[in-house]
Amino acid sequence: MRALTAIIVAAALAGAVSATGLGVGSLSVSPSTVPLGSTFTVSGCGYPVPSAIVFEVVGPKKATPAIDYFTSGEPVGPDGCFSETWIASWSVAGAFELFSSYRDAKGTHKAAVVKFTVTAGP
C-alpha cells in the first residue's frame, strides 16, 4: 500500500495521476487537477484483447444530484491500451474517482481506480 501511495504522489507531482490495484490494467488521468469545463485525458494499458472498458464516475458527496454513473463499453486497442479525451462537464467541483472494468467473453471484471480533482474554473 505504501508503494502505491508513493506512486500516486509522484504522478500527481508530475501533473498526472495513475493507479492500478483492483485487477488487470492501469488507469490514469492527466492533468490530475482539472478546471470545470476543461478537457483532460483518461488513459491506460494492460487490458485483455479483445475486450471493452466500462468506466464508473463517482463525484463529490456534496453533489446534488449525486454524480455516480457508468459509461458504455469503450473498445480497447490491439495493444491493450486506450486513451480518450473527456470534458469536466459536471455540475460541481471537488474530489472525483474513476473506476475501470473490462468486459470480455467471461463477464465483467474490475480493473483499476484513480482519484482526481475538479476545480471551480480556470
Image (spheres, helix red, strand yellow):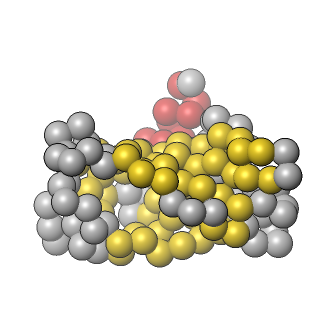
Above or below, 26 relative to 81: above
Q: Is residue 17 above or below residue 36?
A: above
Q: Residue 53: horizontal and vertical position, in percent?
A: 65, 58
Relative image position of residue 120 (x, y in whole percent): 14, 61
Residue 18 seen in render: no
Picture quadrant where residue 50 is located: bottom right
Q: What residue appears at the point 73 percent right and 52 percent down from the top-left corner?
A: 103
Q: Is residue 85 visible?
A: yes
Quadrant location of the C terminus in the rendered image: bottom left
The residue located at (84%, 45%) in the rendering is: 106
**Residue 65 percent coordinates (x, y):** 21, 48
Give how far across and how far down residue 78 sits, in percent. 82, 72
Quarter of the picture holding the N terminus: top right
- Total labels: the figure holds 0
Q: Considering depth in this image, is 23 or 69 the residue closer to the camera?
A: 69
Toward the viewer: 92 or 71? 71
